[in-house]
Image: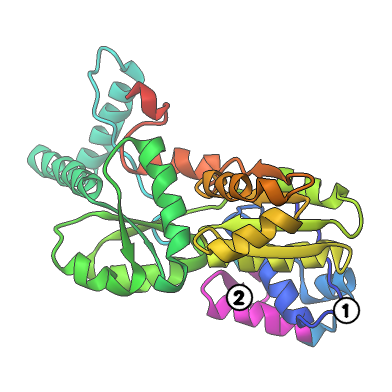
Amino acid sequence: MLQFQIQSDSEISASKQLFDQIRFAIASRQYPPGHRLPSTRQLAMITGLHRNTVSKVYQSLEEAGLVDSIAGSGIYVKAPESETGVVLDKSLFREYPEASQLIQRSLDELLGQGLSLFQVKELFLETVEWRLRSLARVLVTAPQRDLGAGQLILSELEQALAIPVELVPLEDLPQILTALNGGTVVTSRYFLAEAEDLARPFGVRVIPVDIYDYSRELTLIKALPQNTCLGIVSLSPGILGIAEILIHSLRGEDLLLKTALASDGQKLRALARTARTIIADPASEAIVRQAIAREREHLIRAPEVICTEHYIGEESIRILRRELGLGEGDAGNE
């Protein structure tokens, strides 16, 4: 689990540091839906911050749609509206006897509630048809300001799902959904509340994906020698922003941290010349290595390039495959 660390002498406010660390814990599912956050008193003791500061951070998290405050109980990570969906996996009864038994039990229960066999059939058919329509158009969305995050999600989903996936800026989502007869919207938990508000009038579900927790990379960063120049490269300005907060909270001024978007050639060249270690997301790795190759004649020692394993958490891929009715096996076995 993430250990909250606040740099009191930083130019970044303590509340901003704490807000981003909790938001990262939620987005990477270290704090899963339903998880109870520490009380304001507990978190104040852990971080050394005033309880009023912690309360304001929790209020900001609630306004962002990330947590729910339950009077007399506490603060809980908010579960998205679509996370409890039921999957009907239509398969041959002889091959899947347990599925057959489940359908029989469900049928008996529905008939026992007074529905006719025809009504049950219609319910099943409508549910399957709705799932098929959801599968027909899978839209990845992110705000225009951080469309790079959407591109990272898109590239991983195309490989993991082996179905067509489209990237749509959040600002254009209502216009696109107006023309659709069903579909599924996928986004990061960072943008979940905005996406759900836009998709709700169209009856389209929004499925969040949790980002990779970067535990391997954070362990590596902890072990870097003091005064090391560390570079972070990503398609997503949002990822660069949270990386700056997390690394600063972890190491303070111990490291010289430089970040660059994969599209910023000038900053990439500067990183190639000055950084000892560069961490890049999978979509940026090749671009980073090309920048280093172009600067090689100016380098005494080329920086070590470390590619992050994922952008999306593996459990999110499994849940998304289930929700889309693709099963939970590897995409390559479909």
Residue 259's x, y, as percent?
A: 66, 64
- Identify the image quadrant of residue 66: bottom right
Classify residue 19 as left or right of residue 324. Answer: right
What's the residue at 22%, 18% (across, down)? 92
Dot placed on the residue nearer the N-terminal end, 2 or 1: 1
- The boundaries of the magenta stretch are 53-75
Q: Which mark is residue 8?
A: 1
What's the residue at 24%, 49% (across, down)? 134
Label 1 neighbour load within 10 Å: few <14, some 14-19, many 20+ = some
What's the residue at 76%, 64% (across, down)? 257
Q: Which mark is residue 330?
A: none
Q: Secondary structure at mark 2?
A: helix
**Residue 18 seen in the current view:** yes
Q: Pick whichever, 83 or 257, lies toward us.
A: 257
Quick check: 113 above or below 274? above
Residue 44's x, y, as percent?
A: 84, 75
Classify residue 168 as left or right of residue 31. Answer: left
Q: Secondary structure at mark 1?
A: loop
| Total number of numbered discs in the rendering | 2
